[in-house]
Amino acid sequence: MQPEITDPTTRAAGQALPAGQAMLSVRGLKKVYQTDAGDIEAVRNLTFDLRPGELACLVGPSGSGKTTLLKCISGLMAPTAGEVLLDGKPVAGPPKKMAVVFQEYGRSLFPWMRVRENVELPLKNQGVPKAERARLVEDALEAVGLSHVPRSYPWQLSGGMQQRVAIARAIAYQPEVLLMDEPFAAVDAQTRADLEDLIRTVWKKLGVTVLFVTHDIDESVYLGERVIILSSSPTVVQEDLTIDLPADRDQLNTRALPRFTELRHHVYEQIQLAKKGHRPAAASDTV
């Protein structure tokens, strides 16, 4: 008999919070690309909210518009319709209260700058005073376990350490919302596990709101308080799943829990349904 997810763990797809309760709000987001072959509707109608201090993971089939969505949320791309709100205010460009960590950490770090200089750069560009910059950089490097390599160059570090530098740069900026676009996809399995635990540690310490985009189902269940599952393109929210695992997690014991297995099975099942074109009833008629 297949494990089932009980009702209390699921939310209505596209459910919004009452006014004033959300740190990040996505409302009826739609993105259509205009090409020589005609219009391509990448994202149809996405609505969801994140509370302050929440860690949510976003998963979906390949080509489901995860990166497009993240670009719209971060203000790097304008949606065709709908809106993104950060703390109640519309996002019309890259907001100061938001930071992004990308998958390709090697391209986001400047190889001619030392670790400390890479982490400091956004603060410098914002005109943060030198003494405060030094404190924020030191705190960020300590938070990601890199306080021993501030004078190293990125190319002298392993891939996992380079991604830690990218994370340090993001949190030194003191964002209210941290967006992460498959940040661990390019590192080995052991490093990935270490970085997953690092994110949960930093998230708890700083209280930042995190939206973590991943294609790894196990990772989404291990990391998140919620997993937002996307449909196939054109994209809507297929399901919004609460992850009712213990708040304190570790790679060995948490992944061995029967509940972990149930949850990952359910997410996998939903993604397989999405690949076959299944869409939530409330969204299937939305055009």
Image (tube, helix red, strand yellow):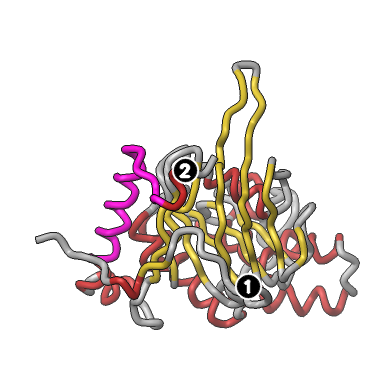
Q: Are marks 1 and 2 in contact (CB under 8 Å)?
A: no
Query: Residue beneath label 2, please?
Result: 285
Where's the N terminus, which quadrant? bottom left
Residue 19 showing in the rendered view: yes
Task: From this view, report whether residue 231 is shown above or below residue 178.
Answer: above
Task: From this view, report whether residue 63 is shown above or below residue 144.
Answer: above
Query: Residue beneath label 1, please?
Result: 22
Nearer to us in this view, 250 or 264: 264
Residue furthest top as drawn = 36
Q: Which residues are magenta?
A: 262-281
Task: From this view, report whether residue 58 is shown above or below residue 236.
Answer: below
Nearer to us in this view, 136 or 62: 62
Residue 156 is inside the magenta segment:
no
- What amino acid is found at the position of numbered circle 1 in the picture? Ala
How would you rate the neighbour count of disc 2 (Cα within 10 Å): few for under 14, some for 14-19, many for 20 or more?
few
Mark 1 vs mark 2, CA separation in Å: 27 Å
Would you say 206 lies left or right of 241 here? right
The local secondary structure at tag 1 comes to: loop
Would you say 21 lies left or right of 127 here? left
The residue depicted at 53 percent of the width and 47 percent of the height is 66
